[in-house]
């Protein structure tokens, strides 16, 4: 989120310093879905063409039963009268960072400092002080505000007088990446696959040189070691159990994540603020977490614009907190928890009822649009802007 906030501040002619802990952008396979409201926001700051140049359009997604096959398919073109982007754009998070960084390299007045890991933040009546560990030792930087976009273990949030309430799932998420083309077997580019024993999710992202890479997400028990889960024979057994084929799968990535559902009790403590995963974390089903982070920083940047350029009162930052924290609690947490609950449902009657509701929703234009307004994050984003 730091790069996206930087792009906003750059566009708004607000000076900033971006501190990065690493020496480069890491290409680990994390988020990869960009929803319509986010695409609209990137368009507004002149970045949409860059994202579209490397992203792939997903116009529909499927709910499946692992044994029965397709339950329902939802066409996002239903939203064509609500947005100029009635689709999802699949683009890996590290590529978004790279494209934004390249864009910033064409502008003047920004400062990016790599290998500057924030280790502490403090504030007083005149400003904030950030302490950062660098290859040359610890340094201090002064500023008017600090915005922590530093992830679920945010040092900025830990320096604030806030709680990070919620829970951790007992199971972890195992993500395997393969170039095998599941699309040739009827799978959409985004699939949520229900099963009482081993649910999964399947997504196609652009991959290396836009050649296409499929990610499969499985639940993994809390006790198995990473070594055992990543073992080649175990990986092949798991993926072959999902979709048998002749010969082994080529596996590009193996990743294992602990998954939480948490929201900070406040996004602001004086001159200290948080956004993105530093403010809220959730399971990835629905592709909402990264997008909520985008919406956070665009919202916050507009508040900073009013303060910096128009002499606005910093109570605007309390409005940022109300708007974004409210929808994180009422939409992000509720929806992502529900998404997981639905596809892992063990009760056969409840599962079949869910399937019937999906089919009814997909076949009814009014219900389908209402459902997609939520799933595409349009409803939640618009609601956040209405909060005063």
Image (cartoon, rainbow, N blue to C red):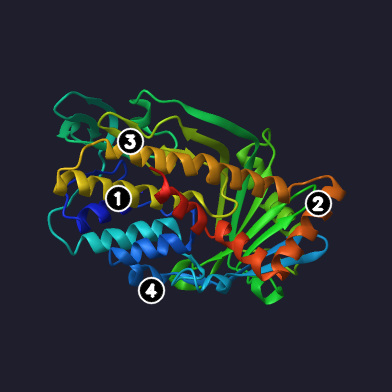
Task: Say whether marks 3 and 4 touch (CB < 8 Å).
Answer: no
Q: Earlier in the sequence, mark 3 or mark 4?
A: 4
How far, Cα to Cα, is label 1 from label 3? Answer: 18 Å
Q: Which residue is mark 4?
A: 53
In the rendered view, would you say 179 is above or below 26?
below
**Residue mark closest to the camera, 4 vs 2:** 2
Residue positioned 25% across, 36% down in the render: 146
Q: Earlier in the sequence, mark 1 or mark 3?
A: 1
Task: Say whether marks 3 and 2 touch (CB < 8 Å).
Answer: no
Q: Earlier in the sequence, mark 1 or mark 4?
A: 1
Q: Is 282 or 115 nearer to us in this picture?
A: 282
Residue positioned 80% across, 48% down in the render: 196
Residue positioned 70% across, 74% down in the render: 186
Task: Say whether marks 1 and 4 touch (CB < 8 Å).
Answer: no
The numbered dot on residue 16 is none
Q: Which residue is mark 1?
A: 5
How far, Cα to Cα, is label 1 from label 4? Answer: 21 Å
How far, Cα to Cα, is label 3 from label 2? Answer: 42 Å
Q: Which residue is mark 2?
A: 351
How far, Cα to Cα, is label 2 from label 1? Answer: 41 Å
How far, Cα to Cα, is label 3 from label 4? Answer: 37 Å
Q: Position of residue 9 (x, y in %)?
A: 22, 52
**Residue mark closest to the camera, 1 vs 3:** 3
Around disc 4, counting alpha carbons within 10 Å, would you say few (fewer than 14), some (14 to 19), or many (20 or more)? Answer: few
Task: Say whether marks 1 and 3 touch (CB < 8 Å).
Answer: no
Q: Position of residue 214 (x, y in %)?
A: 59, 64
Around disc 3, counting alpha carbons within 10 Å, would you say few (fewer than 14), some (14 to 19), or many (20 or more)? Answer: some
Q: Which residue is mark 3?
A: 318
Q: Is residue 151 visible?
A: no
């Amino acid at each position: 989120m730091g790069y996206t906030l930087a792009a906003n501040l750059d566009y708004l002619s607000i000076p900033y310093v971006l501190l990065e802990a690493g020496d480069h952008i890491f290409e680990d396979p994390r988020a990869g879905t960009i929803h319509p409201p986010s695409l609209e926001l990137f368009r507004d700051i002149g970045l949409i063409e860059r994202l579209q140049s490397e992203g792939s359009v997903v116009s529909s997604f499927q709910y499946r039963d692992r044994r029965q096959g397709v339950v329902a398919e939802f066409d996002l073109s239903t939203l064509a009268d609500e947005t100029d982007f009635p689709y999802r754009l699949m683009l890996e998070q590290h590529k978004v960072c790279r494209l934004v960084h390249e864009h910033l390299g064409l502008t003047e007045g920004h400062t990016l400092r790599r290998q500057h890991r924030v280790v502490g933040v403090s504030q007083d009546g005149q400003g904030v002080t950030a302490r950062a560990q660098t290859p040359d030792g610890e340094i201090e930087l002064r500023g008017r505000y600090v915005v922590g976009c530093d992830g679920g273990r945010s040092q900025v949030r830990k320096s604030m007088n806030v709680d990070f309430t919620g829970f951790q799932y007992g199971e972890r998420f195992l993500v395997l990446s393969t170039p095998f083309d599941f699309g040739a077997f009827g799978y959409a580019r985004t699939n949520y696959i229900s099963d009482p024993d081993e649910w999964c999710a399947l997504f196609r992202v652009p991959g290396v040189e836009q050649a296409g890479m499929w990610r499969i997400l499985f639940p993994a028990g809390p006790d198995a070691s990473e070594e055992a889960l990543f073992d080649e024979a175990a990986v092949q057994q798991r993926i072959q159990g999902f979709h048998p084929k002749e010969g082994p799968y080529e596996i590009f990535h193996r990743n294992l994540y602990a998954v939480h559902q948490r929201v900070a009790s406040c996004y602001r403590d004086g001159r200290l603020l948080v956004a993105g995963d530093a403010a809220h974390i959730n399971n990835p089903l629905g592709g909402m977490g990264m997008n909520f982070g985008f919406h956070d920083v665009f919202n916050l940047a507009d508040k900073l614009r009013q303060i910096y350029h128009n002499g606005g009162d910093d109570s605007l930052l309390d409005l940022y907190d109300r708007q974004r924290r409210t929808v994180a609690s009422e939409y992000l947490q509720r929806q992502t928890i529900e998404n997981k609950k639905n596809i892992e449902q063990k009760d056969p009657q409840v599962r079949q009822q869910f399937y019937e509701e999906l089919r009814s929703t997909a076949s009814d234009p009014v219900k389908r649009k209402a459902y997609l307004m939520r799933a595409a994050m349009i409803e939640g984003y618009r609601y956040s802007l209405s909060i005063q």
